[in-house]
Image (cartoon, rainbow, N blue to C red):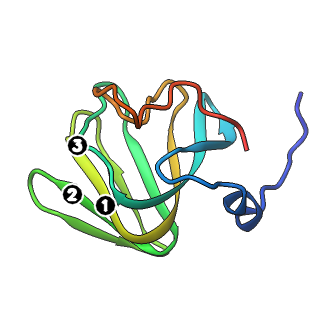
Amino acid sequence: MASPQKVNLVEKFSKITEYRSPKIAGELNRQHVKLVKMKGEFIWHHHDDEDELFLVVKGKFLMELRTGNIEVNEGEFIVIPRGVEHRPVATEEAHIILFEPATTVNTGNIKNDYTRDNQQHI
């Protein structure tokens, strides 16, 4: 059995040097806790089988949805249900925690230069 370990978010985020490239900071119940720095536009995509939770630790971002946009500010989170097309956009750098199944590919149904199949632990 693994022993519990705490995670210092400031330290972990300081190790992330590129935008839109999630890093795994923890695992629980076949779920990954991922950290990502966002700035700029991501791509429109959806996940057929997974819901995603975006929790803003620092900054803010706009979750663009086909039905309207939602601003998500520091200290807030949004859950994107499976199948919902979305595009995160951050005009300034935002630090975000993602909670999602370990099988989740960051670009969902799209494969392109942003796709990170083998995400690193940080």
Residue contact between numbered discs 3 and 2, judged by CB atoms under 8 Å: yes
Tell me if mark 3 has few (under 14), some (14-19) or many (20+) residues whose alpha carbon lies within 10 angstroms of its own.
Answer: some
Residue that mark 1 sits on: 89
Q: Is residue 41 left or right of residue 44?
A: right
The residue at 22%/43% (across/down) is 44
Residue 105 vs 68, above or below: the answer is above
User: Residue at the spot x=59%, y=37% of the render?
Assistant: 32
Identify residue type, mark 3.
Trp
Q: Amino acid at mark 1?
A: Val
Residue 3 x %, y % = 91, 39
Q: Residue furthest left?
A: 67
Give x and y (percent) for residue 94: 48, 67
**Residue at the image point whose x is 89% and y is 27% from the top:** 1
Sequence-first tag of 1 and 2: 2
Instruction: Please name the residue that numbered disc 3 is placed on.
Output: 44
Number of marks drawn: 3
**Which residue in the structure is indicated by mark 2?**
64
